[in-house]
Amino acid sequence: MRTRREFVMVAAGTALGATAATPETSAQTPARDKAQAQPEASRQFPKGFFWGTATSSYQIEGAWNEDGKGPSIWDTYAHTPGKIKNNDTGDVANDHYHRYKEDVKLMKDLGATAYRFSISWPRIFPEGVGQPNAKGLDFYSRLVEELKAAGIEPFATLYHWELPQALQDKGGWQKRDTARAFADYAGYMAEKLSDRVRHFFTINEFRSMADMGYRGLEVAIPGGTMTIALAPGLKLAPGELNQVRHHAVLGHGLAVQAIRAKGKAGTKVGPAEVILAAVPLIETPEHIKAAQTATREMNAEFLTVMLEGQYTDAYLKGAGKDAPKFTDDDLKVIAAPLDVVGINVYKPNVYVLASDQAPGWRVIPFAKGHPKMFNQWLTVGPEALYWAPKLVQSLWGAKEIHITENGCASDDVIADDGKVYDTDRIMFLRACLTQLQRATADGVPVHGYFQWSTMDNFEWTAGFGNRFGLVHVDFKTQKRTPKLSAVWFREAATRNAVV
Ligand code: FCB
């Protein structure tokens, strides 16, 4: 066992940093040390691979009504008793709005070379449209400066579910005007930040924000299903939901156009979608083909239409009279060419096998005893980190893929010695990154990985009870304590390899 002081040193990177050789420095390392310090070549990621962590504004910033910020649907939802576990809110959250400098320092200590954060739309446009709020913009500008000074590449997400309440009051994503308003805000941010931010993601998790927000989504878990609802917490009819989904992808396409029009040349843009990954249970050509067909169809409303410019026949036929209303021009906008495809990958959504019957694949339910992580919904299946990017490449020829989220919550506790021994998270991350490395070794163009999350934070309806961080946060004192997984992450990032 290490002493507390040793652990702190390790967590801060000083102790292990001394022996951790990057591929560049290892040339100067004596042969014996080199053998110990250099991971097997087969576990190495491509040169220049981004090792990032991710957060979102509502989940960490706090300062919900400071400096001219308008309310979002999450402020409203969390302030409604009974919606969030323990009636927790993001009013203060991690107080990151005031502590961002300390948090950037933590990221640097994690060995991170990239950071994916999100911008709160109502901090910039309190009413969703109209006059921008200079103080809101200034916060993100200062954050970006701090990141750049620390050598951390900023990746900005424009919509991580914080619709300005003023727009929800006018019908939210049920209204086409919201797509236009989103694009105007996206263009404004690109104009102001693209001199320093090279990557923008439009919308985080189209499916979660539309389906969980506007209807409630049933997800498969070992032994059954569970329903997840998010703000604004509506229960729309299927046809109305399809229209919300359509407006979301339309908003994405319009935002891509606006970013190109207002941003600096070379600015990269793409979605950050929670891909529904069908994973072949047995890796033979027929089952792989089945997984590919299934993945294309399961993502028809979002990734498939964004990357193909068409809704699939099966989706339109299945929706029948509830299909979204759209024009050919809409489809052109939705399929605006992308530079990057961001995918959030936590698990296989379904396992599939080939079938003689149409549609050529069948879902094999998770066995009752199939392992899961701390979250009921987080079925263990690290091979999703191989198949999801691989299928994005083979289906749509994506040239630059980022894993914009991956991680797990744990029932983390501070041990008597003050440390957090999150063995389950280390196991999970190692297993996932092993599969991701396999994808890069196969030539799948994955350029970056963003672990969710930099630090424990407000996990939506689960409140502060689901700890996803590499860094533990005591929400009473705001004390940050790097967990053992932070040490693991730093080692992997520094060596650019699975460790
Ligand atoms: C994703 C969300 C993210 C976080 C993780 C655990 O669906 O994008 O904000 O809640 O799940």
Image (cartoon, rainbow, N blue to C red):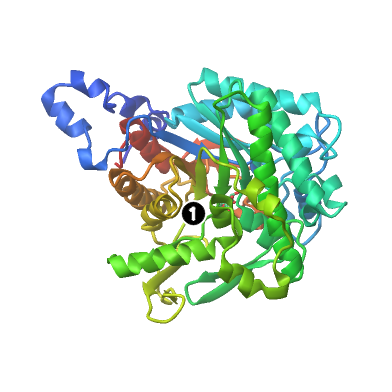
Most foreground residue, 60 or 284: 284
- Answer few, some or many: residues within 10 Å of disc 1's Cα (few below 14, many 20 plus, some between 14 and 19): some
Image quadrant where one finds the C terminus: top left
Residue appearing at x 65%, y 52% in the figure: 331
Q: Position of residue 410 (x, y in %)?
A: 49, 54
Residue appearing at x 69%, y 25% in the figure: 191
169 to 242, vertically: above or below? above
Q: Position of residue 49 (x, y in %)?
A: 38, 34
190 to 72, vertically: above or below? above
Element under disc 1: loop
Q: Position of residue 348 (x, y in %)?
A: 44, 62
Residue 57 makes an appearance in the image: no
Image quadrant where one finds the N terminus: top left
Q: Amino acid at mark 1?
A: Ser
Residue appearing at x 67%, y 61% in the figure: 212
Q: Quadrant of residue 13?
A: top left
Q: Is residue 165 left or right of residue 107?
A: right
Q: Is residue 140 left or right of residue 398?
A: right
Residue appearing at x 60%, y 24% in the figure: 144
282 to 57, vertically: above or below? below
Most foreground residue, 336 or 92: 336
Q: Is residue 399 left or right of residue 305?
A: left
Q: In the rendered image, which residue does mark 1 sit on?
A: 410
Q: Quadrant of residue 395?
A: bottom left
